[in-house]
Amino acid sequence: MAKLTIGFGVLLILLGITGYVTTGSAHPTALIPAGIGVFFVLFGVMANSEDSKKRMLWMHISVTVALLVFLGMIPSAIDTLKLSRGASFPHPIAVEEKGALCLLSLIYVLFCVRSFISARRARLV
């Protein structure tokens, strides 16, 4: 799971850089997903440990942060759906970027939950 966390962080960094470049490098707030991605890379590096307690701690921290990001981005996901149906927004690239951040966070949380359930079942057997 540590490698998945690092990969997720890299995806967020790429999302942030792409959003920043797409806006003509005029809106530094487009780099917010990249900042979040840096944290996930750090979480993944910290979770890449032989100590199972440290690994569990950092993975639980990372999934909690991803869940909070997802919950915070739900209104943006709704705006993304409105945008796809023809609504107009002053900065449509920002709406799309936040919708992508919401979707990526949800996918990551689901992968982590699946992994946590599998690990729990393996311990019980």
Image: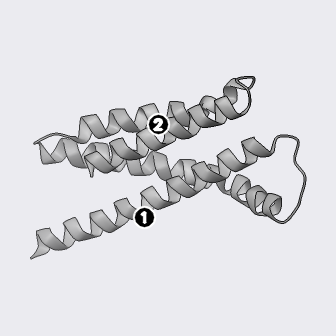
Mark 2 and mark 1: Cα distance apart in space: 17 Å
In front: 125, or 79? Answer: 79
Q: Position of residue 12 (x, y in %)?
A: 50, 41
Q: Nearer the viewer, residue 106 or 57?
A: 106
Q: Quadrant of residue 42?
A: top left
Q: Residue at x 47, y 36 (%)?
A: 37
The C terminus lies in quadrant? bottom left
From this viewpoint, which residue is outermost toward the bottom? 125
**Could you tell whether 45 is left or right of 40 in the image?**
left
Q: Residues within 10 Å of mark 2 (few under 14, many from 20)?
A: many
Amino acid beneath label 2 = Gly
- Under circle 1, the secondary element is helix
Q: Disc 1 residue type?
A: Leu
Q: Which residue is mark 2?
A: 37
Classify 10 Å Cα crowding around label 1: few (below 14), some (14-19), many (20 and above).
some
Mark drawn on residue 110: 1
Residue, x 65% and y 30% (percent of image)? 20
| Local secondary structure at mark 2 | helix
Q: In the visual, does 75 lie left or right of 10? A: right
